[in-house]
Image (cartoon, grey):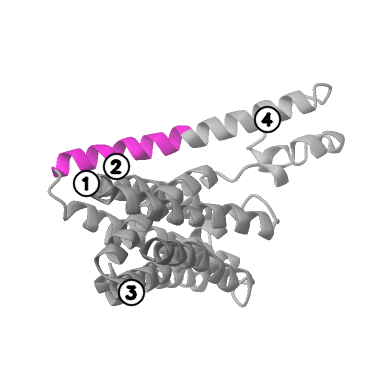
Amino acid sequence: MTLIAIIIGTLVAGIGSVWLAAALSFGALARYTQHMLSLAAGALMATAFLHLLPEAFESQIEAHSLFLILLLGLVFFFLLDKAELWHHGHEHHHESPHAPAAPHAHDGHTHAHHHGHAAVHVHDHGAPQPGSWAVLTGDSVHCFGDGILIASAFMADMRLGAAAALAVLAHEVPHHMGDLMVLRGGTSNKRMALVKVSLAGAVTALGGLAGYWLVDTLHAYLPYFLVVASSSFVYVALADLIPQLQKRLTLPQTLAQVAWLGVGIALVSLISGLTAHGH
């Protein structure tokens, strides 16, 4: 019975939060793409700095070790982005061997006008969005950790488990909105973005199953999971989302950006505060 409750709770928290985020991102708020980028950046940074990292540093693990993991995580996701962009450029190079020479595939703005007949092969529309693999990897690690937390709570008490599942669902929504914005940045396919983030969310159930069988062993490594997930969210916010916002704007537009960034931070802060007892 406990195992069934863990599976249901982790699936509701992991996938339900993604669908709720999609309903908000692709529904009423879909017209405000630039505002959603600001909100996503704020939500991802707040999730890392106000929720995941404090929880990791509450453990007995030495701070120096956790900071080292954070640094290595940032470098790893940087290299992951490099590999993704290199692979995409290499792929396009083989697709159009007779096309005139053009800049690399990920530099979409400069080659859009390079002899129109070559544009079909090198235009930016199919390019991977920088940060997409980083955010999916980090999200999967984070969701795995959430699954362990939910399993631990259910094994202690069924009501505590239900509260933990609801807490995870609530605090995941803002940063899943950020995930969806990152993935939508390189493609117009909402369904594919939703599928990818839903699969990452489903990893919560894997964490729940692992937690059920190995709760004592895995719980000791939970701070490391939290720091790796944090490094992915910080990297995506600072390397991908924030640069998209760094453009010359009017004062009202700039104030709107800052306001939506604040909304993202406040939303995560509020939800984390309200649901802290659920964890």
Residue 42 shows in this picture: no
Residue occupying image coordinates x 22% and y 42%: 67
**Which quadrant is the N terminus positioned in?**
bottom left
Q: Residue furthest front?
A: 1
Between the residue at mark 2 and the residue at mark 3, the CA separation in whole angstroms equals 29 Å
Q: Which of the marked residues, 2 or 3, is nearer the chain's N terminus?
A: 2
Residue 188 among those drawn in magenta: no
Magenta part of the chain: 62-79
Report the residue marked by disc 1: 220
Location of mark 4 (residue): 103
Dot 4 falls on a residue whose secondary structure is loop
Q: Nearer the viewer, mark 3 or mark 4?
A: 3
Observer-side mark, 2 or 4, equals: 2
Which residue is farthest right? 117
Residue position marked by numbered label 3 in the rendering: 163
**Residue drawn at x 45%, y 49% as measured from the top left:** 140
Query: Badges 1 and 3: C-beta atoms under 8 Å apart?
Result: no
| Residue 126 in the image, given as x and y percentages of width and height | 71, 44
Give above or below for 175 relative to 230. Answer: below
